[in-house]
Image (tube, helix red, strand yellow):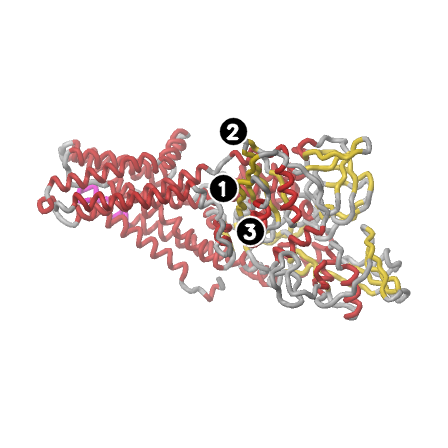
Amino acid sequence: MTGMTAQNASCLHCDAPVKRAEPYCCAGCKAAHEFQALSTPDFSFHDCINTDDTGTHSLTLVVQGMHCGGCIQKIERTIKEHPQVSFARVNMSTERVKYSWKGARERGDAIAKDVMDLGYQLRSLDQQSLMEAPSEEKILLKSIALSGFAAGNIMLLSVGVWSTTGETMGFATRDLFHWLSAMIAIPTVLFAGRPFFRSALSVLKRGQTNMDVPISLAIVLACCMSLFETINSGEHVYFDSAVMLVFFLLTGRYLDARAKGKARQSASNLLSKLTGTAMVLEDNKTTRVAASELQPSMIVLVAAGENFPADGVVISGTSEVDLSLISGESLPKPLTVGAGVYAGTLNLVAPVKFRVSEAREETLLSKIVRMMETAEQGNAKYIRLADKMARLYTPVVHLVSLMTLLGWLFLLDAQWQVAMLHAVTVLIITCPCALGLAVPIVQVLASGRLMRHGILLKSGDALEKLAEIDTVIFDKTGTLTQGNLDLLPGLWSRSDLQLAASLGAKSRHPLSRAISKAYKGKIHDLDVEEVPGKGISGCFRGETVKLGSHLWVDTIEGSDVTTASLWLKVGDHPPRQFLFTDQLRADSNAVIDMLHALSIDIHILSGDRRSAVKQVANDLNITHFTAETSPLDKCDYIDALQQAGRKILFVGDGLNDAPALAKAYVSMSPSSAVDISQTSADIIFQGDALMPVIRAFKTARISKTLVKQNFALAIMYNIFAVPIAMAGFITPLIAAIAMSGSSLVVVANAFRLNLPQSKEGV
Amino acid sequence: MDILIYLIPIALVLGLVGFLGFLWTIKNDQYEDMDGAAQRILFDDDDD
């Protein structure tokens, strides 16, 4: 809060011009500058430096606190100012920076120090997570490029063949076109079709089937049959169908892979919290040790503003700790000798020493992450609607195709080539182009529509699952409520508020911040002293002024207040009370009413105090609520309900919610949630409103109807097309028209999602 | 129809140029940081 007195017209952090009375040019600079004010502990990333054969060192670190392009520029420029730096690049999407230099290996830390001095927090990454290059995404992207190139060129040749007859264009020319198509198509299918072949083979080995089985079979047979036709100067080749199919299906698969890769990255960014360093006290000397080398019973010193590197017990010092990462509780907890601390939580006020009890893999943070992974695996059994369809569809199609072959061979005494040709045509014409599009197109449109309203779907399954839910469980802090404290109107005057804001200007305590947020104006420049866990005192116009708990100002009033409160005492005057509350999201009430109207059960599951949870439950008219739950309790609660056959939507934001988010049938997180929660949630929504829950749910229900209609349309198309194919009347031109025609019908139907549906409120 | 002898190779080569260009962008990691790329266009200096 150093900027409150700013009179100058430039940003305190980056010197860009600002509006009057605004200390910073953007939120990013504000956050970075505030972080700079904290003590930066010394550190070493020595273990994480990679050195290659040419003597070039390189280091990849997680950067926290980047918000805008200015941040990228500042960091990169700072790194490049160092001599012998050959490479410096910030990746905004993954929040990482990579730089390389020649010469002394130690320079890496000096560079990192300069970046930290800018106000960005740097953390080392797990080396293993760096090794897992996102090669799958790149292979998919290359496959898309190849199949797109091939599809375009083959279509160019095919249209030439279709637009005339062999007699007109000359049989030699037609064969040339077919050979060219084959030369493009066969390598393309061999390379770009591998994702489908691999998936099909692996499910066949397990004796099951999915959409990839008919896709692979149709692609392979279409190519083989077309090649055979080409060699024999035949009339009909289907290279265009095969390659086009590969191209469209790969596109969907790439989008899927990208979403998964992003989720994996944010998970490894979170785990990097544990791979930092810790200041270990030994024989009155301090040494820097990597958090991964901490052992139980070591004594560690943690500065204010630093994260605890391990679980343990405080042995000296008094401070306050922000436990919201673990418990979801909004108010900081006082920390005294004997209190337990958890890895990853933030030490707020003063330095403390603690004795490590659990380190590395044994910390609560690691356990929560493991719990989340287990829950996720348990949930992976969901079978997509499309796969359910495939299980019905595949045997039928293959049977029909076989019947065609046998029918032509034995009933009509056809040559085996002719019989084979017709059988393969059946496979191609039934190839699930429309069926394969029926689900993805609805999901793409639904997610695009939700995205415009600030709702991000992480996977298509989420939409299918969301349509089926019958129970919603909300976390309290940060989900039903806004998650930050606001000052309530009270008996204080504006000058009281000004004085309180002046006292609390430099404090990082959430209540001081809430006061500073409520007070917009000039503040007095005071010398203040902060006593951890109690309050702030200072001198104003010759009188002692105090801001803090009721004990700090010696009053017995208000000790029974359940909401957060602060007292201001000026000299000997009676103290004034400031009350704070974590306010409900503005539309929480409306959303709960709408869910009631849809006859969906509503529960609250919170890690916060019972009184606070009860208050919210009463305000919102929710009968089922459970308070003071641990992450494991939340998981068990959901498990018990799911065992009873409930389909649960869990909405939560804290790290303590992450396992529950992964466990629930489907889950949502606000975008203010911690990274790991966003990773485990299926849907993320932005903004201060809770209405996205309703919007997503209604869109999911509409989508489900549309998907079902699309399946019906695709099946109807097959009922008409298959007999024609069995009778042998299909040519490649008819196949191309039929396939694209049915796809168009399905797409057009899906677009009905975008028709105005104002009466439904979505 | 002799014109095909020129036209088909030209069409293929043009497609191939686009295809190779795309492969080059993949190899250059140009799809690794879409958010950052959107910001970088606003930088004033041209030294990057």
Q: Which chain does the residue under circle 1 lie in?
A: A
Give amino acid for label 1. Answer: Gly
Residue appearing at x 50%, y 56% in the figure: B42
Q: Position of residue B27 (x, y in %)?
A: 42, 40
Q: Residues within 10 Å of mark 1 (few under 14, many from 20)?
A: some
Disc 3 secondary structure class: helix
Chain under disc 3: A
Where is residue A270, by image quadrant?
A: top right
**Residue highlighted by disc 2:** A53
Of label 3 and label 1, which has the lower sequence position?
3
Q: CA distance from mark 1 to mark 2?
A: 30 Å
**Can residue A665 be seen in the rendering of this structure?**
no
Q: CA distance from mark 3 to mark 1?
A: 26 Å
* A33 in the magenta segment: no
**Quarter of the figure with residue A84:** top right
Labels 3 and 1 touching (C-beta < 8 A): no
Q: Pick whichever, A121 or A429, lies toward us.
A: A121
The three-letter amino acid code for the residue at tag 2 is Asp
Quadrant housing the N terminus of chain A: bottom right
A246 or A446: nearer the viewer: A246
User: Which residue lies under the disc numbered 3?
Assistant: A73
Q: Is residue A728 magenta?
A: yes
Q: Main secondary structure of the magenta part?
A: helix
What x and y, as percent, mark residue B28?
43, 42
Element at badge 1?
Answer: helix
Front residue of this view, candidates A757 and B16 = B16
What stretch of residues is rendered in magenta? A717-731
